[in-house]
Image: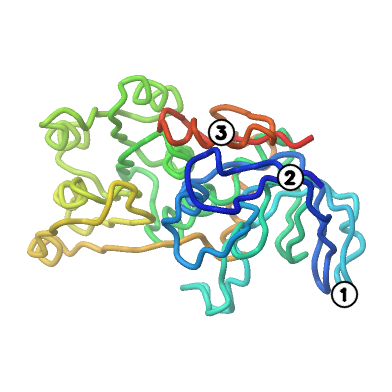
Amino acid sequence: MKAILLRDPGGPEMLRAEDVPDPTPGPGEALVRLKAAALNHRDVWIRTGQYAGIKLPAILGSDGAGVVEAVGEGADEALVGREVVINPSLDWGDDERFFGPDFRILGLPDHGTYAQYVKVPAANVHPRPAGLSWQEAAAVPLAGLTAYRALVPRAAVKAGETVLIPGIGGGVATFALLFARKLGARVLVTSGSDEKLERAKALGADGGVNYRDEKWADKVRELGDGGVDVVVDGVGGQTYDQCIDLLNPGGRMVTFGATTGPVPQVATRRIFWKQLNLLGTTMGSPADFAAMLTLFANGGLRPVVDRVFPLSNASEAHRHMDEAAQFGKIVLEIP
């Protein structure tokens, strides 16, 4: 099969198309003939050597959608021929609250979806949501799962609450906007790009502020009538403490990443004085994934696809992600 291999860490040019043996499904596994895959920042961190436990060569990619072509011993043979989307959260474990010791994410150490075929546990394939194209279906898994768990099981967002999403434009942040609006919440966003703020408003955001403005936090507070109830943050860095300051009493801060680096300082007095909840989240359980997919059933929601590249141009897709100009998901079309 054709696949994109990473043999050494470095720039986008280190992603090279190669011919590799087709995978064979083992016991309890399904072999999926992929139609589309999608990029995540995790792929970039692996590519640049900034991820724990890197073992090369590797086929990157956590997101994928396609057709089940074969199953291994013990797997349901009725899956063969079905159009599916893949849950990249492997071996979550038995506790809904957190993943177990065998948890891992598709795309390292297991070979991922930048390829014509991928094998995964049969339990991790789900019916492709009706009405979504292959590219849209492939855009959903990792970012959609992360956003859903942050908003629903972790933050328990309710209708009428105000949710702040810093750094709108990335995959998780964009899904968080769609899901929060679906839940009936008001949504405020920040970005360093006025164009991204306008696109977010077109998707349903109630307001947006450019964080390059020195008084951005004051403007968010004004839009939120004094503050916000929930922050869904993957940015970290210098703005984290300001987001805590924006929370109303009893508010919740859910963190799923720190793309701008570690948090330098947090004023803990405000955490206990305002009875705040600081919550962490990573990926999600099988139950979370199944519940998340229902939001896309019958055309209820559509993911935002930024650009589509052919599989052979995976390096160009990574260059586009490195530029941080995308709004929504970057997708690979697989021949």
Residue at left 7%, top 64%? 269
Q: CA distance from mark 3 to mark 2?
A: 17 Å
Tell me which label, 3 or 2, sits earlier in the chain.
2
> In which quarter of the view is residue 132 placed?
top right
Identity of the amino acid at label 1?
Answer: Gly
Q: Secondary structure at mark 2?
A: strand
Which residue position holds label 3?
317
Q: CA distance from mark 1 to mark 3?
A: 37 Å
Tell me which label, 1 or 2, sits earlier in the chain.
2
Q: CA distance from mark 1 to mark 2?
A: 31 Å
Which residue position holds label 1?
74
Q: In the image, is 256 to the left or to the right of 332?
A: left
Residue 46 visible in the picture: yes
> In which quarter of the view is residue 254 placed?
bottom left
Residue at left 42%, top 53%? 151
Q: In the image, is 139 to the left or to the right of 115?
A: left
Which residue position holds label 2?
18
Between label 1 and label 3, give the one nearer the viewer.
3
